[in-house]
Amino acid sequence: MPGTNLTRVEAEARAAVITTDTYQVELDLTTSEDTFRSTSTVRFSATPGEATFIDLIAPTVHSIVLNGIELDPASAFVDSRIELTGLAADNVLTVTADCEYMNTGEGLHRFVDPEDGEVYLYSQFEVADTRRVYAVFEQPDLKASFQFTVTAPAHWHVVSNNPGTHAPVADATVTIAGKDHNVARWEFTPTTRIPCYVTAVVAGPYHRVEGTVQSRKGTLSADVYCRKALAQYLDADVVLGDTQKGFDFYESTFQMDYPFEKYDQLFVPEFNAGAMENAGCVTFLEDYVFRSKTAQARVERRTVTILHELAHMWFGDLVTMKWWNDLWLNESFAEFVSTLAAAETKYDNAWVTFNSLEKSWAYRQDQLPSTHPIMANIRDLEDVEVNFDGITYAKGASVLRQMVAWVGQDKFFEGVAEYMRKYHHANATLSDLLVELEKASGRDLAAWSDVWLQKAGVTTLRPVIEVDTHDDIAAFTIKQEVPSEWPTQRPHRLGIGGYDVKVDRHGELVLERVMFVEIDIDGPSTSVPQLIGVHRPALILVNDNDLAYAKVRMDEDSLATAVEHLSGFQDPLPRSMVLASAWDMTRDGEMAARQFIDLVLKNIGAEDQSTIVMMLLRQLETTLALFVTPDAAVEATHATGDALWHLAIEAQTGSDNQLQFVKAFASLASTEAQLDIIQGLLDGKLHLEELEIDSDLAWDLLTSLVAGGRSAEIAIELQLTKDATASGERRAANARAAIGTAEAKRTAWDLLVNADKDLPNALQSAATSGFGRVHDTALLAPYVDEYFGSVRRIYNEKTNEMAANLIEGLYPSQLAGRDEDLQTKADAWLMENADAHDALKRLIIEGRDGVRRALEAQAIDA
Ligand SMILES: [Zn+2]
């Protein structure tokens, strides 16, 4: 990939030589449409006489002045680094360059709104893209104070980490979309010491809603921004309400004031992730401004995301990891504490969502051959780029939850508060945190951290139950099975619940909890004497209340009860756990795919948790595409489609379930009768009461039609005239790539893989998912060889985000069981490309493992 890699060894060597003090960064955003002028003045101290280098990715470097001496860029600037030799004790370096606007969501991203030609910019620097905007010592432990100055069109808003003021620049103009604009200059106050990856500049004619939050420090400015075109949909009051809850919760839990001067939140176009924790200037994916009716699961997810980013202000921005191997500590902590904050301030069922969403992600990732300990070995930047994964976020958060159960929540946060008091504005490592947690809790965490943080893999807990002639429990043992690659037994603190089928006062059959114990287990086999003599309940659930991180199996009788009475659970958490267990069994080839489909279809209609519904519908699609034996897949897809339409009709009108069922039906619809229904809904000839066909649902329906061969390019163009927006462009890119003809697939493939000019990140990802959407997998067969023939080039030529998304998104998994050479081709690629970077090989190994799993599940389902 372009841009020099940086190894941990190099970063350590550099931090041993220099200490950074301040940066003054001056950006002129009025110079051209392709580049902007960047002047970076860095003050730093060094061991006299030593040499080092500073990072910069720029097409042109105009001048480099070190301590008053001009260096020649032609010789000093090589491969994204500027060599600095003969350092003094105190140094001043000024670098002036033209840097490139990006359309990949890395560096300074430039977006042109197709509606009005206006330009919107935002920066995104994590992991190492600050150097695309200014010369910088790009590593997390070289913190500094940053002071930004920005020249931009006067009608824009320019936002950075700190507050700023602006004044017009006399006699200067700039032309945008054929119109001349005056120019202004913004000066921001210097930041406190922060790592460069959380510095930020966001600029453009954004729509602003002025707001405030109450901090222990007093009233702080907290504005909310989005693109002008989305202004009518922005619910800033809800965003600020969530934010205020977070401020109250964190300031009291961490026993420390919010560390920055203001807290702006900006919804920006074409963002790669969910959000980014720039200090005092958080950016979000603009899809979180809901322009159409959306599943409640997404609304709840936005709250957790808002709370996640706010947690980073303390954990990450104020106290920063020393090197990227502790990235998990940032992300796991933010994920855990934001769920806790959501559960305690807004959503009672936030832990149910956590089980359904985060834990399933963690378990999936932890069973890939590429899994790794939570404390990953990060040798260089390319290693960390692929590590924003289910281990770093979700497993880490699950394990923190187990740790909190183990040391006690009060003690845990006492230790965290002390850690922040000690390391604020500085850097720290995991062991620094463990020291404080041990002090607060009096528990020895060395052994705990060894099995939980230094060892990968998930263990499986399986109850073995014996009953006597009276149906009382005679013996109860929990077996812990370990994966062969990661043979690590772990201690768990967990609950065991027992449920019986009862008739409630409305005459309905319900599952009532009749038994519960919380115990510690360890080793391959733990007997539970507390349960001996207890009358055997109809359903026994290990890890009831979900404190443990482990896969859980049910005994045969419990599974039978669960399948029969799943909707009888009054509490959604055990219901979600049973479903998770069934999903695990399906993925592990212990439950036939079509049996899982039956379980879901029988129970999803009564499910009232939006996230559970969303996850089950996704799992249905995966099961149909990958796990059902190929001979039965078409028929199973037709039947599931019919069942979903029936569920949509039966669902309460205007409900979340109705919307989710219609969308899922649209994505499976393939028979003539099903496509007739889709066509009817889109044309308005068929109505479901209170189901509004808004912009996004219209696109869902149209995409269904083009994938089913009913409509073509012309219908997409027509829809785009009705929704001539940036969001519409993305939906159109997705729909075009989904057209179910060989020609359309070829066009999409060439656009993604073979075009001279890259698509912007958001269009690339929309087209990638459209390409993979087929009813007839034969459409994808011609691309297997081309895929393996192109990935090396894609990885080398494109930026990190763009390459990883493409290589992952285009992996021909759907041909599992349909192309018998698929695994051989992956093996051959791995053999021939043994010298490729591990990060690239990892993507191929993960794709290959997805196919292996699919083949095993198909064998069980046959
Ligand atoms: Zn985060």
Image (tube, grey):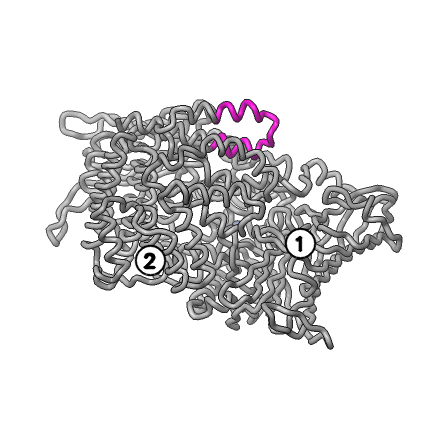
Predominant secondary structure, magenta span: helix
Q: Identify the residue shown where x is 18% and y is 39%.
A: 564
Q: Depth check: 827 or 754 in front? A: 754
Name the disc covering residue 9, or none.
none
Tell me which amino acid carries mark 2: Leu
Give percent across and percent down for residue 211: 51, 71
Magenta extent:
826-846
Q: Is residue 619 left or right of residue 650?
A: right
Q: Identify the residue shown where x is 35% and y is 36%.
A: 777
Q: Depth check: 88 or 538 in front? A: 88
Marks 1 and 2 sit apart, C-alpha to C-alpha, by 37 Å
Q: What element carries label 2?
A: helix
Give percent across and percent down for residue 300: 39, 56
Q: Earlier in the sequence, mark 1 or mark 2?
A: 1
Q: Is residue 321 left or right of residue 244?
A: right
Name the disc covering residue 697, or none.
2
Q: In this view, does 529 lie to the left or right of 557?
A: right
Q: What element carries label 1?
A: strand
> Which residue, given by chain and number where applicable, does mark 1 sit on?
100
Q: Is residue 840 magenta?
A: yes
**Vertically, is 417 above or below 157?**
above
Give percent across and percent down for residue 484: 44, 22
